[in-house]
Amino acid sequence: MRNVLKNPYAMVIGVALVVVVLYPLLPSSYYVRVAALAFINALAVLGLNVLMGFAGQVSLGHAGFFGIGAYAVAVGPAHLGTPSWAALPAGVVSAALIAFFVGRPILKLKGYYLAVATMGMGILFAMVVSNEANLTGGPNGMRVSRLILFGWSASGPPTWYWISGITLVIGAWIAVNLIESPTGRAFRAIHDSETAAHVLGVDAARYKLLAFVLSAVYASIAGSYFALFDGFVTPETTSFLRSIEFVVMAVLGGLGSILGSIVGATILVVLPQALTVFHDYEHIVLGALIIVFLIFLPAGIVPALRSLLQTRAS
Amino acid sequence: MSLLIVENLRIAFGGLVAVDGVSFAVQRGEIFALIGPNGAGKTTLFNIISGIYAPQGGRIVLDGEDVSGLPPYQLARRGLSRTFQNLQIFFRMSTVENVMVGRHLHEKRNVLAHLFALPSVKAQNRATRACAEKLLALVGLSAVADTPAGGLPYGALKRLEIARALATEPKILLLDEPAAGCNPTETEEVDAVIKKIAAQGIAVVLVEHDMRMVMNISSRIHVLDRARTLAEGTAEAVRANPAVMAAYLGGHGKREVHRAHA
Amino acid sequence: MRQGEAAVAEFLQFAFSGLTVGAIYALVALGFTLTYSAAEVVNFAQGEFVMLGGMVTVFAAAGGVPLPLAAVLAVVVAIAIGLALHRFAIEPARGASAVTLIIITIGASILLRGLAATFFDKNYHSLPSLFGNEPWHIGGATLLPQSLVVLAGAAIVVLGLSGFLTRTIMGKALRATAANKLAARLVGINTSAVIGLSFALSAAIGAIGGILAAPITLTNYDVGSMLALKGFAAAMLGGMGHPLGAVVGGVLLGVFEAFGAGYVSSQYKDAVAFIVILLVLFSMPQGLFGNSNVERV
């Protein structure tokens, strides 16, 4: 049993099982919707985890890529006449290209310089989105036409539950593949000592850029799903607060832990829904949560639970 | 032809000249030691040769090719590897994974294959791990292969760095104080490993303060003092050199050196 | 007015508003610099101190407290919160990575903003100007008397801080801790108390800035976030950890912003600060007054 659990792919199967088993257990459409949102956010956070948890590069501008995906499926059909099913991959390609060109200079920075630079990039993007009203609908946002695949309209919580759930499982599978590969080892080496990795023949600049582009791809797909599901998109999806929320989800669940990203995202999506009475106090709860968790559980929930289980077992 | 030729290397930080016109040549399979008082410029010299700093003057020729100013990962490709004075171990990875990273240059680096777990990746991982395990056996760390590196004692970490550096299949290996902070037993273990490496035909450039070890295993010794070359030659020649004794060995050093040849 | 006169008037107008807002940025930047040099923490809650200065004064005055007393109360509240921030959020996280600390301070700023929205309200509020609202006319441009109050107030704070750092024992202890924490501890300085002091000082400075500026810029539960980011840009421009740099950076940023908004695009006024951050990070991360370090391996 222990050996089965040690296999990293066991977690992917576990997530797939949860997605399948959870659906019939959800009492109403509202819960299905919350679950779908949790899956979408988890996908975005998975990407951030590849960058921050595996490769050790901090990004406080992740929501920028999320926003690219979201606005791609809004602007494409509305202003360029592209159908939604084409706008999604176009968004992914745009996000990847932007990550590639922005990443090259930005990833030369380290530590809090990198954090601030990514924050600056994210905020600048949010400003552009907010200001170019003829294109993006400005601060009030714009409608997103539904995704139409082969004449069938993909809308409603159940449809998006399955689309985002399945994508999440695939995303987790890819992430596990990555970690168990030479590329994954290169990421982790860069995280622990970039100098040593360099000296051993790892082209650190190239791998950091790769991690950045991958994180952008995950975020863009999640953003597109979000916009298509919601039917509406506002600049809030690209805001600095959103970037911070993604980081908190990743850190809360456990940086470097794929399961942790999913857990962290789920908690931060479900909690405000569960505490709707606290809606006005959302900021207070979020702020307090950040402080308490980063002080007392800086490694994150999943790693903490794992070491607890390990000490119990021995 | 010499494997590594260092010609007139010079670097200054602000107003401080750290290396001032140092030249030497290292042959295949020899153990070449760099000694000198603290602050003489030994580690800085290593950093220049391994590409971490770019020289402001002079050049470096590796196996006939001018490699001055190339970044570290390019030098690794050309057969140069090194360890660090202050350990740069991947503490969050296991012992064997540390060495596996060293195999990076000899692995297939197709990212798409990695992302989608194509069958070749599994085979690649197995081959890499097998090679890493062989190197761990060489330095005596087989028992702790899957232990997180952060849990190993200091001496073991020093040997791990050597195993990791060897994984790149270097022609020349720079060891920066491999025995620093080691107790006598650990020092002997490191000593044995270095001899095994040189026996395989890999050139070793060694920065060390442990005079007994240096005199014991080096073919030639290059003495640095205050950024400049003070002397170079065989162990006997260097220890007899009055300038070297005055600057570095002193009376105590002389006793150490005699003990080494007892 | 003739063409030339109009251009001069426009230029002066932008310069005045740029200098005024630049003085506020300078104060926020000073706060960043103080806590960064003493504690090596970039405190993103810095902007909330400015917010508290204005909001607490407004609500205390509305509650019947005479205005000068309300202002003093606001500064005291800000200092208390600064100390609490240090004691409950920064101290316990000692040893955490720089990025973790930044995120903790971001969490604190979110928390404070939420508390302000709950305990105060979400509206904009103003404070009465010290010398009335009748603008002066200089060279065709208008200058509010409160602008001079802001500039003078900022100058007094800077001079006061400078005097404190150079002439008092506490100030010297702070500089020692900033220069080398371990050495300071070894000579008997209670570095923890000194760091607490740096938080208290930066809170006070921020609050004073908020009180001085509220008559012109209005105050609101949300002003802190943008101010923090811009004050941070100013501190980076001048060189993180250099008080003179913070002041110069703040004034420069305010002026760039005003001229950018006036001559280039008013829509993207807020973008100036972020463009400045990026330019500084890519070309001279150490800022105008900082010195570049070489990393030793």
Image: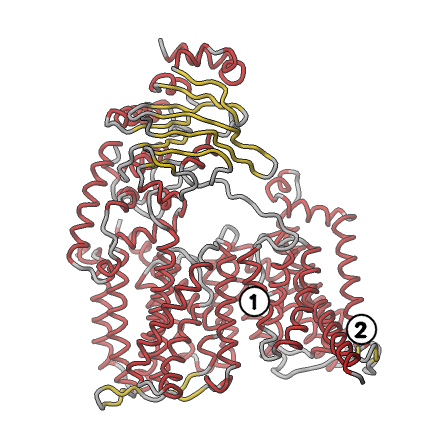
Q: Left of A90 or right of it: where is A285?
A: right
Percent position (x, y) of residue A140? Answer: 49, 87
Query: Are both tags, 2 and 1, on one chain?
Result: yes
| Residue for point 26% across, 32% down | B139
| Residue for point 67% across, 73% down | C259
In the image shown, does A255 or C89 lie closer to the viewer?
A: A255
Instruction: Give the letter of the chain under mark 2.
Output: C
Q: Earlier in the sequence, mark 2 or mark 1?
A: 2
Q: Which mark is residue C68?
A: 2
Percent position (x, y) of residue A279? Answer: 48, 81
- Secondary structure of residue under mark 2: helix
Three-letter code, disc 2: Pro
> Is residue A27 shown above or below B122?
below
Of the two numbered discs 2 and 1 in the rendering, the one whose residue sits closer to the viewer: 1
Percent position (x, y) of residue A43? Answer: 33, 70
- Secondary structure of residue under mark 1: helix
Q: Left of C30 or right of it: where is A4?
A: left
> Is residue A30 shown above or below C268?
below
Task: Kindly identify which residue carries mark 1.
Answer: C275
- Quadrant for residue A237, please give it: bottom left
Q: Left of B216 or right of it: where is C108?
A: right
Mark-to-mark CA distance, 2 and 1: 38 Å
Look at the image and tell me in which quarter the N terminus of chain A lies: bottom left
Three-letter code, disc 1: Ile
Query: Can residue C8 be seen here?
Result: yes
In the image shown, does B58 or A49 lie closer to the viewer?
A: B58
In the image shown, does A262 or B38 lie closer to the viewer?
A: B38
Q: Residues within 10 Å of mark 1 (few under 14, many from 20)?
A: some
Q: Which mark is residue A102?
A: none
Q: Residues within 10 Å of mark 2 (few under 14, many from 20)?
A: few
Instruction: Give the letter of the chain under mark 1.
Output: C
Percent position (x, y) of residue B66? Answer: 38, 37
